[in-house]
Image (cartoon, rainbow, N blue to C red):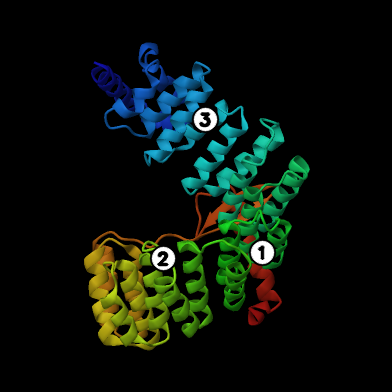
Amino acid sequence: MLHMILSQRVILLRKYHSSANALVTKSPNSIPELVKHIDSDLIRNAHKVFDEIPELDVISATAVIGRFVKESRHVEASQAFKRLLCLGIRPNEFTFGTVIGSSTTSRDVKLVIGGFSQTGRNEEAVNTFVDMLREGVVIPNESTFPCAITAISNIASHGAGKSIHACAIKFLGKRFNVFVWNSLISFYSKCGNMEDSLLAFNKLEEEQRNIVSWNSMIWGYAHNGRGEEAVAMFEKMVKDTNLRPNNVTILGVLFACNHAGLIQEGYMYFNKAVNDYDDPNLLELEHYACMVDMLSRSGRFKEAEELIKSMPLDPGIGFWKALLGGCQIHSNKRLAKLAASKILELDPRDVSSYVMLSNAYSAMENWQNVSLIRRKMKETGLKRFTGCSWIEVRDQIRVFVNADKNNELKDEVYRMLALVSQHLEENECWKDL
């Protein structure tokens, strides 16, 4: 019976949305109109709503959340939002606006900020957190700060992150827990500031440091090209603590060895993980892919092939991409052809695979195949993802893409770029670039 009622309501909801689509895309105020199509008797069965609605999407989910907010059922609104994320439905600006309006506790704020971050909208997560602080919506605590710091880590905005760090000191004082410190360790390392990352790590008492703390430091050194320090940090963890390395730890060490050219050390740690740790699930596809990448980058293709053949797991696309990357460096045409065929066989819609193939053929000066790859991308409608940059302006994160024509400040931006270009030309500064 409930399913039949829901089906009828959703049909009405979609019909209304179809006729009002233009209005919805222009104004968030139209969302409450959609909510009217969900009856009070239906919303009382809230725990079944998301499971029973046929073809649940962001429109119907937002309508359900909006009805909860309208009836001041903020806990249910937060739970519904969390359920939406668990179902893999990407919230839109109306969903977030509805949830933010009902956020009255630190738990709600954590949910909203985390929701933004989990869906790749990190600048909105940071800006929302700053706005909530400014408006005094809720007092942040040791559970909300890690969410905000994690979001800002993902865009590596150093200045804004330091401001939030200072804000955390103001609100928390000495109540920094391991989650706050771990998020700060990760933030500073992603910004390339390993000195402050180490300071945050050292602020933690030895008994407070968990595997996440050590992993953040190992990965921080590895990502910043300081492979030997990453290895030293791993050795210190093994020697000075009772913590057992997990799959993230081992992958971090292998990544560090790979990018620092420490091939023998990488082999040693890989073999230790295979033989010394009694955990059959410790090594995953990513670990083998990292080893294949390490061997192929150093030109040891025979060993890379043997490792792929001896693997207890089926090689995925990551292995063949790693092998192709090495073939590109060392112009190994035979293996490049094999890797290329496997990549296209496993995922013919993966844009990055086509880009790698095109680059590999270019390195081998095989222009005919470069042309074929590009033509195939065009025929299948595949396009490279546009890169983006961001800048902090008056505590707000603003995002730009290449040749951006949709930014609200585009006229001012391009006018300033023209002035800067003119200044560089007049002073012959191009020679120094």
Identify which residue is drawn at 27% across, 29% down: 54
Is there any visible trace of residue 311 in the rendered image? yes
Label 2 is placed on what type of residue? Asp
Of residues 29 and 320, the one drawn nearer to the viewer in this rendering: 320
Label 3 is placed on what type of residue? Val
Q: Is residue 349 left or right of residue 425?
A: left
Of residues 198 and 223, the one drawn nearer to the viewer in this rendering: 198
State whether residue 155 is above or below residue 304. Answer: above
Q: Which label sits in the foreground, 3 or 2?
A: 2
Gap in angstroms between the C-alphas marked 1 and 3:
43 Å
**Which picture quadrant has residue 297?**
bottom left
Badge 2 is on which residue? 278
Q: Which label sits in the foreground, 1 or 3?
A: 3
Neighbour class for label 3 at 10 Å: few (<14), some, many (≥20)?
many
**What label does residue 99 carry, if any?**
3
Identify which residue is drawn at 26% across, 67% down: 314
Query: Residue 400 at what x, y percent from top left?
Result: 54, 55
Assign a secondary structure to mark 2: loop
Assign a secondary structure to mark 3: helix
Identify which residue is drawn at 68% across, 60% down: 201
Sequence-wise, the earlier of marks 3 and 2 is 3
**What label does residue 419 carry, if any?**
1
Query: Residue 73 at what x, y percent from top left?
Result: 51, 19
